[in-house]
Amino acid sequence: MKIGEVCLETNNVRRLADFYRWLLGIPGDDHDEVHQTLIAEETMLTIYNDGSVKNNQNRNISLAFTVHDIQSYHRGLLERGTEIIEGPTARPWGVVNMSFYDPDGNVIYLREFQ
């Protein structure tokens, strides 16, 4: 079994999709306010507004992405004004992790294997 897609429900599809398009390095400028699908390698990320009001206080899920240059992402996130939870930190198991909030307050982790 494979996970077919991850969906983030939001009140602001364009803002969140633009953020993830930048983060994942996906070109394009979709103006759909209800539903956008981003595909990076084998993973589909859907940004969707089902019409209900979201409180953006969901702290029950986080997303993690593996990157090749975590310092570059860290600089880019700071330039975008992203709220960083923890900057790049080397872990004893051979990885550098960092965490931050996406525009809806979801916790996102980046990791770079050393």
Image: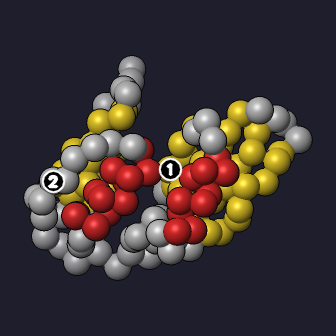
Q: Is residue 45 above or below residue 59?
A: above
Q: Quadrant of the C terminus?
A: top right
Which is more toward the observer, 104 or 50?
104
Is any part of residue 109 visible from this angle?
no
Tell me which amino acid carries mark 2.
Answer: Asp
Q: Quadrant of the N terminus?
A: top left
Q: Given this view, does label 1 or label 2 mark the residue nearer the observer?
A: 2
| Residue that badge 2 annotates | 30
Q: Quadrant of residue 91?
A: top right
Q: Position of residue 107 (x, y in %)?
A: 53, 62
Residue 82 drawn at (x, y percent)? 51, 70
In this rendering, position of residue 9 left or right of residue 100: left
Q: Give 100 or 74, whichever is nearer the viewer.
A: 74
- Of mark 1 and mark 2, the one earlier in the sequence is 2
- Tell me the amino acid under the disc marked 1: Leu
Mark 1, secondary structure of its residue: strand
What's the residue at 61%, 36% (across, down)?
Answer: 68
Q: Which residue is mark 1?
A: 63
Task: Residue 6: name its quadrant.
Answer: top left
Residue 27 picture location, percent across and down? 28, 44
